[in-house]
Amino acid sequence: MQATAEFQLIPLGAGVSVRREVERVVALLRSRPLLTETHASGTNIEGEMHEILNAVEAVHKALHAEGAVRLVSYLKLETRTDKTPTLAGKRL
């Protein structure tokens, strides 16, 4: 099932700067068969729903393996039955 999503990951306890973690998240998402667009507070994603969910899980696993103790994610996921959801269709 095709879906669009907005994904935000917040590493807690990582200090004031979380640039390293955010760059890692973006790299992990871009390594998958997903269309991604970063913005100021997260990443928009387009792809198969199972690929999006698998990517979120992989991001959590990778950052924990790299030393992150606590991660909080927000995921807004959209699916439709009347047409295929796309990031391009969301632009004003």
Image (tube, helix red, strand yellow):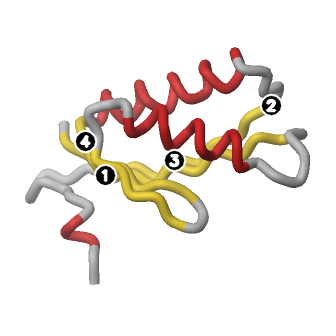
Residue drawn at x 48%, y 32% is 28
**SS type, badge 3:** strand
Q: Position of residue 20 (x, y in %)?
A: 70, 42
Q: CA distance from mark 4 to mark 2?
A: 27 Å
Q: Position of residue 14 (x, y in %)?
A: 86, 40
| Callout 4 amino acid | Gly
Please tell me how crowded label 4 is: few (under 14), some (14-19), or many (20+) other residues with Cα within 10 Å: many
| Callout 2 amino acid | Arg
Q: Position of residue 62 (x, y in %)?
A: 61, 21
Residue indicated by mark 1 = 4
Residue indicated by mark 3 = 75
Residue 41 - label: none
Residue indicated by mark 2 = 70
Q: CA distance from mark 1 to mark 2?
A: 26 Å
Q: CA distance from mark 3 to mark 2?
A: 17 Å
Residue drawn at x 28%, y 84% is 92
Q: Are marks 4 and 3 in contact (CB under 8 Å)?
A: no
Residue drawn at x 61%, y 19% is 61
Residue drawn at x 51%, y 49% is 7
43 displayed left or right of 20? left
**SS type, badge 1:** strand
| Callout 3 amino acid | Leu
Residue 77 to residue 48: above or below: below
Which mark sits nearer the N-terminus, 1 or 4?
1
Q: CA distance from mark 1 to mark 4?
A: 7 Å
**SS type, badge 4:** strand
**SS type, badge 2:** strand
Residue 47 - label: 4
Which mark sits nearer the N-terminus, 1 or 3?
1
Residue 39 to residue 29: above or below: below
Which mark sits nearer the N-terminus, 4 or 2?
4
Residue 86 to residue 13: above or below: below
